Image (cartoon, helix red, strand yellow):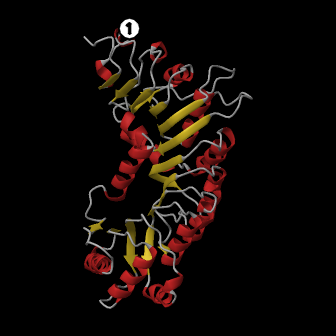
Amino acid sequence: MLPPSLRHLEVPSDMLGPELADSCPALENLVLRDPFRLCTLPIDRWRHLRLLSGPCGVGQEALEKLAMSNTIQQLDINIICPPIADELQVPSVSRSRLAFLEVLKLHSWTFEQSIKAMHILFDLTTSAPLPRIKEFGLEVNADQLLIVNSLALPSLVADSFMEEHDNSPELAPFMTFFAAHFSTEVLTCFSMSNSDNTLSGSSAWLYDTVRPLCAFTRLTHVTLHIRPTLKDRCALRGPHILALASDWPLLEYLDIGPLLEPVLLQELIALLEHCPRLVSPWLSVLVRSADTLELARSIEDLRSRAGVDRLLLEHDGPQAGDVNLTACVLRAIVPDLKEVHTHASDQLDFWRGTLEKMDAGRDGASRATRVVDMNASLCGHSDDLSQDFSRHIL
């Protein structure tokens, strides 16, 4: 028996029944641990509910109940796909709507279903003021269909969907939709990923597609993990990133990948100049011997950025003699650097030596440094993302 004064509850969703709303009327935070089980709880009967997370598996009915809430502030929800739930339908008449959320994190199997879910939550067909979201995250993963349908559909049907489905036509409308229907004055965190390799197109197409994000000039944290099909080269380049970031002067954290090619050291310097608050540029950076030599010749003109203590680096062909020069240039640009992550397993000793040289030339006591082999990490890049995303989104 749960106490009626209970305010926070974290349980598997199959342990709960509709009587929970009566036994715990003061509940404020509800975390359900099964994202693929459709939530049928009477959400609208909790008058103090502020957070629904897990993520919580929702369909049309749950979304409509959430739209009627006057207290909900943070949502982490998974749009359940058929056959467990029907595909979402946008209501044809105006209904209750959410006007503000501190956090909205959506998981879906298509961008189209994400748009429908947001229409239901915010009733975007009305002429009311644009709804406001402070922190937004979207994960699109068509693999959800395989998970949910693993027992309901023959494997050939599921495999056929994965082969034919292409999220590319949906990405551009989603980005345009988001920029047109939500206030640009409030959003500070935006994170989007597709983890199913279902995007195809050119690098220029992808840049034009995500360009609507530039309308949100108060962004401080941006994460874009856009994975193309294995045969495609749909990824951003260094100049694209510089053009996007030029509209985000308050940016503190930037994580974009995979890139078509690593950004150059000069592009990293330009990025830090564009974004004076940026301390976590989580981008793959290529350090070339010719570039460090050129930068070293005018090292007194380089501006240092305090607070950047971690970078994702690789070298175009490190030699023993490059350690001193690389350390000298990096110390001038990012004097607080103490952690290098790299996908080049054969460069670990080079980067250890570089960090040691940087530390030796630093005033004061030496600091602990480390080099991380991204290929040896089970989670690698995605683990760093999940930690930062949980810190800034939920």
Pinpoint residue 215: horizontal percent, then vertical percent. Answer: 66, 51
For image coordinates 67% across by 31% down, the residue present is: 124
Pinpoint residue 391: horizontal percent, then vertical percent. Answer: 39, 45
State the image quarter where residue 112 is shown. Answer: top right
Foreground: 247 or 316?
A: 247
Pinpoint residue 8: horizontal percent, then vertical percent. Answer: 34, 24
For image coordinates 52% across by 47% down, the residue present is: 189
Picture quarter with the N terminus:
top left
For image coordinates 33% across by 77% down, the residue present is: 362
Instruction: Work out which residue is located at the far front of the displayed protein and give it.
Output: 364
Above or below residue 127? Residue 381 is below
On screen, residue 388 versus residue 232, left or right, reads left
**Total label count?**
1
Mark 1 Cα shell of 10 Å, populated few (<14), some (14-19), many (≥20): few
Above or below residue 64? Residue 305 is below
On screen, residue 354 versus residue 158, left or right, reads left
Residue at the disc numbered 1: 22
